[in-house]
Image: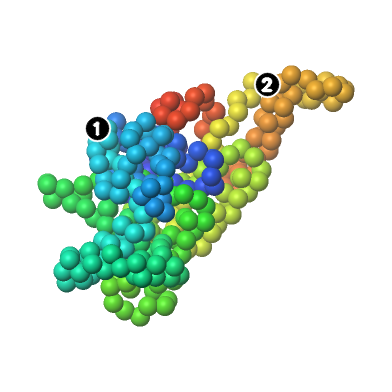
Amino acid sequence: MSLARLVQRRLIIVTGKGGVGKTTLTAALALHYANQGRRVLAAEIVPHPETPSQLALALGIPKPTEEPALVLPNLWAALVTPTIGHHRFLQDSLPMKLLADAAMRSAALKKFLSAAPGFSDMGVMYRMLDLMKRPNAAGGHAYEIVLLDSPATGHALALAQIPEFLIRVIPGGPIRRVAEEGLAVLTDPRITGTIVVTLPETLPVTEALELQQGLAKHRLPVTAIVVNRVPKNPFTKEEHAALMTVLGERTAPVLGSRELRRIERAESALALLKERAPADSVVLAEVDGAGSVATRNLLPSL
């Protein structure tokens, strides 16, 4: 992966279907940039603050809260929920902070903000903008890079669609201004980059390519499609063909045949990706270990 292409951006959104390793990749990038001396915020989108944090497991840290906290040198972590975004929006929009606090204590308002079309995603977007704009004591940005771990493929598309939706249906006012600001940030390739993580199988790669097209439709720039856990192929083409011939002659299962076929499927999926998105594909080899161990093992590959 070209780290130079990513490090120039202030917002990096990591997305993909569940189980592909996107949280591990988010953690690995966060550690990499923090080790380089950059001030990094690793933020995980969750529906509620009580939701278990996969990012905490990947980083090997205590569970984050909605308020960013320094967890490692140069690295902050936080949970991003719709509720904290709604609260910050009301604090910035209403004339008094006490009014915002009182409004967020209203069960009816909370229910409306959670159920109204687009408002949940608006809360996430506002919190994202709020964290990006947070100043430090020196007058610059508190975080040079914000890494956003998006929970699912559909959520990334929703985040891309919500500013356009709000601009269409709301003629003016503070919500319209937030939508316009969000659209400007998300669609600016100098500010935002998106990483789509997938696995070396034909169906996941096809879904990743479809997600890339969906994000591009809404002008959300995709920096790379990362294929995670690619098995190592120790065979030449001739050796592979000879093995397949031998396996085809056997009626009983042979030890290692499943792994050989997995390598075959991986190469087929990578060929599809190279054909349809040659400039955007990045391959990460499979490593042993889990959680924070695997995260640190990924760093040399990046």
The C terminus - image quarter: top left
The percent position of residue 244, horizontal first and vertical second, equals: 79, 25
In which quarter of the view is residue 267 placed?
Answer: top right
Front one among 275 and 223: 223
Instruction: Determine the residue located farthest toward the left in the rendered image.
Output: 138
Choose the circle earlier in sequence order: 2 or 1.
1
The percent position of residue 19, horizontal first and vertical second, equals: 54, 40
Q: Which residue lies under the disc numbered 1?
A: 73
Residue type highlighted by circle 2 = Phe
For label 1, count other residues whose C-alpha is less than 10 Å away and answer few (under 14), some (14-19) or many (20+).
few
Q: Which residue lies under the disc numbered 2?
A: 235
Residue, x 52% and y 33% (percent of image)?
Answer: 284
Color style of the picture:
rainbow
The percent position of residue 16, horizontal first and vertical second, equals: 52, 47
* Residue 42 visible to an observer of this rendering: yes
Front one among 201 and 158: 158
The N terminus - image quarter: top left
Question: Does 243 sit above or below residue 114?
Answer: above
Residue type highlighted by circle 1 = Pro
Q: Secondary structure at mark 2?
A: loop
The mark total stands at: 2
Q: Secondary structure at mark 1?
A: loop
Residue, x 26% and y 61% (percent of image)?
Answer: 88
Question: Label 2 to label 1, Cα distance in Å?
Answer: 42 Å
